[in-house]
Image (spheres, grey):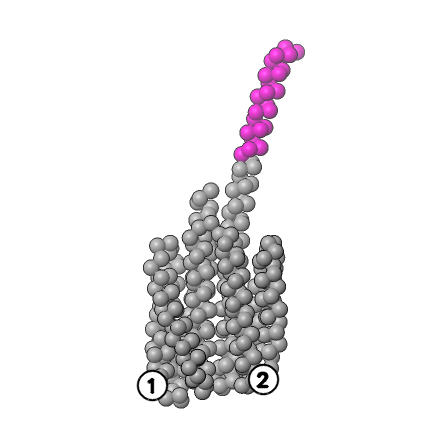
């Protein structure tokens, strides 16, 4: 039998080993939790950005349908987007814990249900006005939601997720306003909004393109958006001089805005991956 002192020393060594192991496991669990939390924040910013973008995209597609511009395809795209938006709300609802985030999310959901019902009405001047109104309200509240979520971020890449999604929203809003103008609504307010959105998009796209945090993959996605913007901006710049019946310009806006939506969504998703990776490297 070992002497009491020897037994005591063995127990102390075992205790120290167990304590060190527990600390190592706790540190690993905290690091894993931080990494998982960063990925969650990034994903939530992307989801909120998609809500903001889709609010304007759906209004644009509804305007298209009312103008008879690829109407059947536009209505099919609206139906597809409805399911996507429902899925985004499901993802955000599962992760929203803070009361202020929950309140804004609830308001967004209520606006979405109203807009969903309005989009099922046959396109016409009155229904289009209602859709546009709800789209702008949803855009504003989804923007607030994105800002609240971004406030939990820890690296600069979170800013790029929000910027890319905001630009995506602006591309759809600009297309919607352009189609409104081509459809006959050339009130001073509409034309001013078009110019403001055009300038903001152009400036923001340049900022995104030159961001030092860009990875090769995100820079490629932004480059594709810049290529589509050439056709889009050309049509916008011709709005004041082109005949309202210029089908080519209208078609360019409709198609290039959809392509911009696709590539900027890819950019946002890539920024989310970059964000999670940057947080992992910081641990």
Q: Nearer the viewer, residue 189 or 84?
A: 189
In magenta, the rendered stretch is 1-24
Distance in Å between CA atoms under marks 1 and 2: 31 Å
* Quadrant into which the N terminus falls: top right
Task: Quickly name the residue at label 1.
Answer: 241
Q: Residue at x 35, y 75 (%)?
A: 233
Q: Position of residue 125 (x, y in %)?
A: 54, 86
Check residue 2 for magenta coloring. yes
Above or below, comparing residue 253 to residue 31 in the picture: below
Check residue 116 for magenta coloring. no
Q: Nearer the viewer, residue 273 or 127?
A: 127
Q: Position of residue 2 (x, y in %)?
A: 63, 12
Q: Position of residue 151 (x, y in %)?
A: 50, 54
Q: Residue at x 55, y 86 (%)?
A: 124
Q: Are discs 1 and 2 less than 8 Å apart at CB?
A: no
How dense is the environment of label 2, judged by Cα within 10 Å: few (below 14), some, or many (20 and up)?
few
Which of the labelled discs sits on residue 42, or is there none?
none
Q: Is residue 7 visible?
A: yes
Which SS does the magenta portion mostly show?
Answer: helix
Q: Quadrant of residue 175?
A: bottom left
Above or below, comparing residue 121 to residue 45 in the picture: below
Q: Quadrant of residue 81?
A: bottom right
Task: Quickly name the residue at label 2.
Answer: 122
Above or below, comparing residue 56 to residue 3 in the picture: below
């Amino acid at each position: 039998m070992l002497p009491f002192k020897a037994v005591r020393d063995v127990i102390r060594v075992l205790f120290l080993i167990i304590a060190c192991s527990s600390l190592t496991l706790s540190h690993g669990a905290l690091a894993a939790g931080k990494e998982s939390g960063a990925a969650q924040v990034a994903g939530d910013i992307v989801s909120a950005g998609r809500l903001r973008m889709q609010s304007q995209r759906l209004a644009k597609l509804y305007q298209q349908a009312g103008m008879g511009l690829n109407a059947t395809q536009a209505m099919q795209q609206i139906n597809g987007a409805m399911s996507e938006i429902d899925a985004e709300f499901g993802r955000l609802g599962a992760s929203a814990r803070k009361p202020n985030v929950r309140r804004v999310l609830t308001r967004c959901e209520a606006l979405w249900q109203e807009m969903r019902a309005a989009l099922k009405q046959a396109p016409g001047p009155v229904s289009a006005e209602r859709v546009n109104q709800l789209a702008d309200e949803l855009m504003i509240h989804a923007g607030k939601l994105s800002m609240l979520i971004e406030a939990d971020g820890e690296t600069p890449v979170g800013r790029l997720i929000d910027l890319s999604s905001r630009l995506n929203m602006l591309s759809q809003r600009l297309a919607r306003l352009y189609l409104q103008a081509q459809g006959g609504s050339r009130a001073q307010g509409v034309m001013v909004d078009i110019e403001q959105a055009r300038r903001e998009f152009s400036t923001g796209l340049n900022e995104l393109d030159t961001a030092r945090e860009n990875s090769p993959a995100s820079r490629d996605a932004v480059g594709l958006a810049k290529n589509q913007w050439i056709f889009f901006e050309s049509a916008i710049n011709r709005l004041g001089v082109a005949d309202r019946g210029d089908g080519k310009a209208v078609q360019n806006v409709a198609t290039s805005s959809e392509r911009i939506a696709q590539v900027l969504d890819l950019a946002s998703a890539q920024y989310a991956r970059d964000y999670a990776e940057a947080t992992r490297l910081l641990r």
